[in-house]
Image: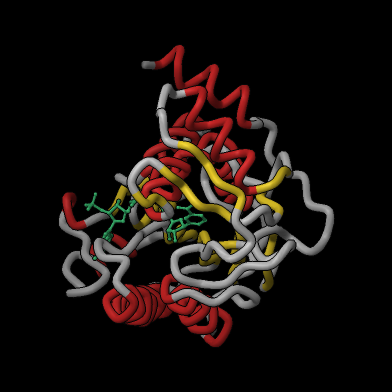
Amino acid sequence: MKIVVIGGTGLIGLKTVAILRQGGHEVVAASPKSGVNTITGEGLKEAMAGAQVVIDLANSPSFEDKAVLEFFETSGRNLLAAEAAASVRHHVALSIVAIDRTDNGYFRAKVTQEKLIAASSIPYTIIRSTQFLEFLRGIADSSADGNIVRLPPVLFQPIAADDVAAIVAAVALAAPRNGIVEIAPERAPFNEIVARYLKAVGDPREVVRDREARYFGGRVEERSLVPLAEVRLGRIGLDEWLRRSQTQA
Ligand SMILES: NC(=O)c1ccc[n+]([C@@H]2O[C@H](COP(=O)([O-])OP(=O)(O)OC[C@H]3O[C@@H](n4cnc5c(N)ncnc54)[C@H](OP(=O)(O)O)[C@@H]3O)[C@@H](O)[C@H]2O)c1
């Protein structure tokens, strides 16, 4: 089966492409680096020719509110139009748990991306993942003031990129659900997970439990970042992920 992975050079894209190729599929790892650009439209028609499944794992180069919204809106429109013209049978996209219950600029852009998909004529599956374990440093940096990292003690359930890629590949090979699948593994307070992570990687910053601390500028409550249902998809918890990262380093 021919599968196009948009953002096939990214964190999740690289891993997903490898899994699908191991399964014997013809996989196009599409991104600006390989001449496929969902913003300018360059290379899209050629990449789509004969494809049955398209997996959108692209990400905006800028996370600034306006730039990220423009990215997911334009990219989504161009990509879905090219897929419709090529009669693609399944569009898979990676989104984020709780984007419609928690407010920040990046989440608003992902809501727009999801709406475009649901309104298109192409059968689809949206996978809503929690934050990647690989993103913990970025989260700590975004919440840091000097040596202090302020985080609210709300529930947090980060997932390893290896788990995400395995689930994305499996979903892409299954029938479209025309709906949303949520994925998330081990659950614990946000500040505790980031504190455990910083300690394990030898980062001296202190994590402070602060009910008023925001997440990328948005206010979060107890269940703002986790699935509302008891979802436990993903086998790799923080300790196992740290062990694997340290073995690979
Ligand atoms: N971070 C999280 O915790 C989290 C959680 C849940 C879901 N997600 C979602 O997961 C998805 C993948 O994230 P990631 O961290 O794997 O991304 P990433 O590592 O930042 O990779 C981004 C990919 O997008 C490609 N790209 C950028 N501009 C493009 C364009 N104009 N046309 C086509 N491709 C373009 C890049 O290509 P080049 O290499 O050529 O630049 C790269 O392959 C994103 O949609 C994100 O919203 C993230």
Q: Nearer the viewer, residue 39 or 124?
A: 39
Find residue 138 and report its horizontal and vertical position in percent.
39, 47
| Residue in view at x 54 percent, y 17 percent | 243
Q: What is the residue that sits farthest to the top in this orientation? A: 247
Q: Is residue 171 above or below residue 68?
A: above
- Whether residue 59 sits left or right of residue 209 in the image: it is left
**Observer able to see residue 92:** no
Find residue 234 and report its horizontal and vertical position in percent.
68, 39
The C terminus sits in image quarter: top left
Q: Is residue 20 above or below residue 221?
A: above
Q: What is the residue that sits farthest to the right in this orientation? A: 230
| Residue in view at x 56 percent, y 26 percent | 241
Q: Nearer the viewer, residue 223 or 61?
A: 223
Ligand 1 picture quarter: bottom left
- Whether residue 206 sits left or right of residue 73 in the image: it is right
What is the image's colouring?
secondary structure
Q: What is the residue that sits farthest to the bottom in this orientation? A: 119
Find residue 194 and report its horizontal and vertical position in percent.
55, 40
So how many labels did they put on this image?
0
**Observer able to see residue 60:** yes
Which image quadrant is residue 4 in?
Answer: bottom left
Which image quadrant is residue 187 in?
Answer: top right
| Residue in view at x 56 percent, y 44 percent | 164
Q: Is residue 145 above or below residue 106?
A: above
Q: Nearer the viewer, residue 158 or 79?
A: 158
Q: Nearer the viewer, residue 239 or 174?
A: 239
Find residue 75 and report its horizontal and vertical position in percent.
32, 74
| Residue in view at x 17 percent, y 74 percent | 40
- Whether residue 192 sits left or right of residue 32 in the image: it is right
